[in-house]
Every structure is written in C-alpha cells, then in structure tokens.
Amino acid sequence: MNKSVSINSEHKKKILKLFRNILRERLGLPTENRREYILIKTRQEFRKAKNETDPKKLRGLTIIGNTQLDTVIVQAKHLSSILDREPTEYEQRNNLSYKEYKKDKTTNNDKTLIINPEFLNKKKIKKKINPEDDIN
C-alpha cells in the first residue's frame, strides 16, 4: 500500500509541475489576450481532470498536457518574433521588464522541440504484401 501512495504522490508532483510550467511559459506570449486565454483554459482543463483515477486516462491526459506545454513554448517563441510583447498588468504596476526577468531565469536548457535529422531523412519502406505483385 505504501508503494501506491508514493506513486500517487510522485504522479501528483509531476502534474503540478506540468501545470506550473504551462502557466510560467504562457508569460512569454506577446499579447495579454493570449496569456489570459492560456491561463483560463489551463485551469479549466486541470480542474476537469482533477478527480480522474484511471491510470490510462491519467497517462493520456499527461501526454496531452505536455503537448500543450510544447505548443505554448513554440507559440511564444514564434509570436514573440513577430509581435512586440505587451506587458502584463503586474509588470505595468511595478514598472518591471519581462526581458530583464527572463534573462535572469534563463538557463542553458532550451525547451524547444528539436527534431532528429536522421528521423527526417529516413525513407518509409513499404512492405510487400504479395510477392507475385512484382511479376510483370
């Protein structure tokens, strides 16, 4: 029984970390509307799945959550290259700069997705179903 409790607490830690990461990464989005949308949608989805106990569904929801985190990171990077970032209300009230904050928090870990070039170069090999198909 202790083992299941520790697994549940470890799982809860991972879920909370995912939730915090999504909320943190949304701050990189350039528009306040988009940041607010991600905040509301994230809270909504996590509350909806709050009482889920089925391990398969939890695994699936975790995968979806990580995909959403990757999406927020990519959108923030892309949209920030196109649009000027609007400061949040907190930044305006306290006369803070997000760029200064981000410089302090930036580590060497780049969280963007990197596609392995070998994967892109692989050609799909079709399996021959019937060897007689090759005969002219």
Image: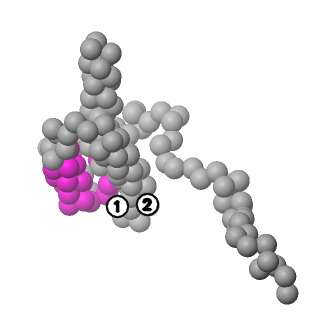
Mark 1 or mark 2, earlier in chain: 2
Secondary-structure class at tag 1: loop
Residue 127 in percent (x, y) is at 71, 66
**Which residue is labeled 1 in the image?**
84
Q: Nearer the viewer, residue 12 or 31?
A: 12
Q: Name the residue: 15% across, 38% down.
A: 51
Q: Quadrant of residue 120?
A: bottom right
Q: Is residue 64 magenta?
A: no
Q: Name the residue: 29% across, 20% down.
A: 4
Q: Name the residue: 20% across, 57% down.
A: 37
Q: Quadrant of residue 36?
A: bottom left
Numbered badge on residue 78: 2
Q: Name the residue: 43% across, 55% down.
A: 74
Give the side of residue 80 with respect to residue 39, left or right: right
Q: Identify the amino acid type marked 2.
A: His
Q: Nearer the viewer, residue 126 or 22?
A: 126
Quadrant holding the N terminus = top left
The magenta-colored residue range is: 27-46
Give the side of residue 55 with respect to residue 91, left or right: right
Q: Nearer the viewer, residue 26 or 115?
A: 115
Q: Magenta residues: mostly which secondary structure?
A: helix
Secondary-structure class at tag 2: helix
State the CA–CA distance, disc 1 to disc 2: 11 Å
Numbered badge on residue 8: none
Q: Residues within 10 Å of mark 1 (few under 14, many from 20)?
A: few
Give the side of residue 46 with respect to residue 109, left or right: left
Residue 33 in percent (x, y) is at 20, 60
Vertically, is 26 above or below 6? below
Q: Identify the amino acid type marked 1.
A: Asp
